[in-house]
Image (cartoon, helix red, strand yellow):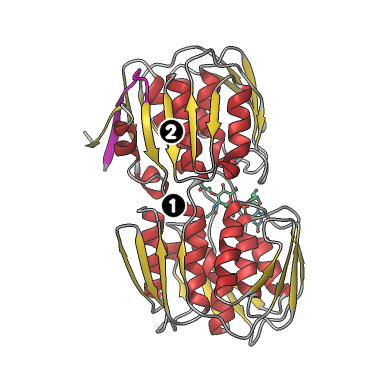
Amino acid sequence: MDEILIKGGRTLRGEVSISGSKNAALPMIAATILTGGQFVFHNVPDLKDIETICQLLVDLGAKAEFSNNTARIDTTGLSHYEASYELVRKMRASVLVLGPLVSRLKRARVSLPGGCAIGARPINMHLEGLQKLGAKIKLEHGYVEAQADRLTGGEIFFDIPTVTGTENLMMAAVAAKGTTVIRNAAREPEIIALADMLNNMGADIRDAGTTVITIHGVSSLQPVTATIIGDRIEAGTYMVAAALTGGKIRLTGADPLHIKPVIHKLREAGVTVGNDDSSITVEGGGPIKSVDIKTLPYPGFPTDMQAQFMVLMSVAGGLSVISESIFENRFIHVSELRRMGADITISGNHAMVKGVGKLSGAPVMATDLRASASLVLAGLVAKNTTRISRIYHLDRGYEAIEKKFAGLGASIKRVPAE
Ligand code: EPU
């Protein structure tokens, strides 16, 4: 298994092109299940998770091709309704096929995702929502079995906003009989991207991006060509890199509006951030001030940027309190950052981060995607060499990460494990 080797201390400068969003692409690719035909997606990130969802579609009987960031998916022959344990355990987002499978094939059998490194992550709200739309749900042998001759519109109220839950139920509802209202819906840009795609397919979804989404069921849907929006979390990660290394990075390909909460916190920390409609420029170099953050559903500060921001706070000028309110175990990077010299104390879902000015390189590993990204950032600013293992997590969510950072002047390379 490969590792990443970083010699820290370089100031990063230049331009980086942000890839398509993983978390927008996954539900959009799952949405191809809804009707037979040829779909084309542009700006698809070349990532392990994209390979997994395409593999899942092939298992269901579709054809999928991927090259040069374009995915072509033909769902004409899709006829199987089972998502196996083998695939779901690799990627929890596989559960996104549940809603569209019940809609098209009237049934679905999807392995129940287990907990993962960042939390228990149940899918009860997906299942309760499907039941509200008339599906019969059984849990047997580790699988969810859902069945409905024709889904019917209903009112769904989420206890807490769930991103993939909102997506799953939007997809289930588009061809249901009657009107569905999702209340306390998630508002992430990826939800709007999926709704735009579904509406282009002929669906009637209103107010995606607000807390109340209304879906009028339609009787037919057509395949479409769609372009994936830029990845706001990848963008945020490079923005923190500019701030951390005291450099200047111009990012293209991401929508500044989607990254507002991160821009806001970077500015509060004393980092200069400018933007026009199509690019964001981040310039560090001055002293970094400690600021507090609390992760919240969009448009709050994203949990997927918490670990990266913690690295910035680790070298800031004071004490920062970072509160994680989405996932119960999302501080797994802390013990690795401590090994690099960070001064972080955890109390419940709060991390007290005392800025130490400098980190020092160490061999580290992480057990989830964003935690791994935080270790790369820490390596970029640390003295001497950092060796990061288990980088398959990074390959799930960051396209060509070492090439992009090397292009900005970092000393970083992928090497076979010793
Ligand atoms: N939750 C429940 N029951 C449910 C669904 C969710 O209790 O049925 C809880 C979760 O345990 C969590 C909260 O609700 O405490 C919110 O979770 P959500 O369902 O919104 O998360 P998700 O849809 O599973 C997506 C992203 C994650 C991102 C979260 C939060 C995708 C494919 N995944 O997960 O992305 O952290 O929203 O923004 O969109 C990542 O990319 O690294 C990643 C983990």
Where residue 140 appears, as percent x and y from the top left, is 57, 72
Q: Residue at x 59, y 32 (%)?
A: 263
Above or below, 49 relative to 234: below
User: Do the CB atoms of the residues marked 2 and 1 lie less than 8 Å apart?
Assistant: no
Q: Which mark is residue 20?
A: 1
Secondary structure type for disc 1:
loop
Task: Note whether residue 149 is visible.
Answer: yes
**Residue 273 included in the magenta stretch of the image:** no
Mark with earlier residue (2, 1): 1
Q: Residue at x 46, y 41 (%)?
A: 234
Q: Nearer the viewer, residue 392 or 84?
A: 392
Secondary structure type for disc 2:
strand
Where residue 37 appears, as percent x and y from the top left, is 43, 81
Q: Quadrant of the N terminus?
A: top left
- The magenta span reads 2-12
Q: Residue at x 44, y 19 (%)?
A: 246
Identify the amino acid type marked 1.
Gly
**Based on the displayed image, in which of its 4 quarters is residue 9 positioned?**
top left
| Residue that numbered label 2 is attached to | 250
Q: Residues within 10 Å of mark 2 (few under 14, many from 20)?
A: many
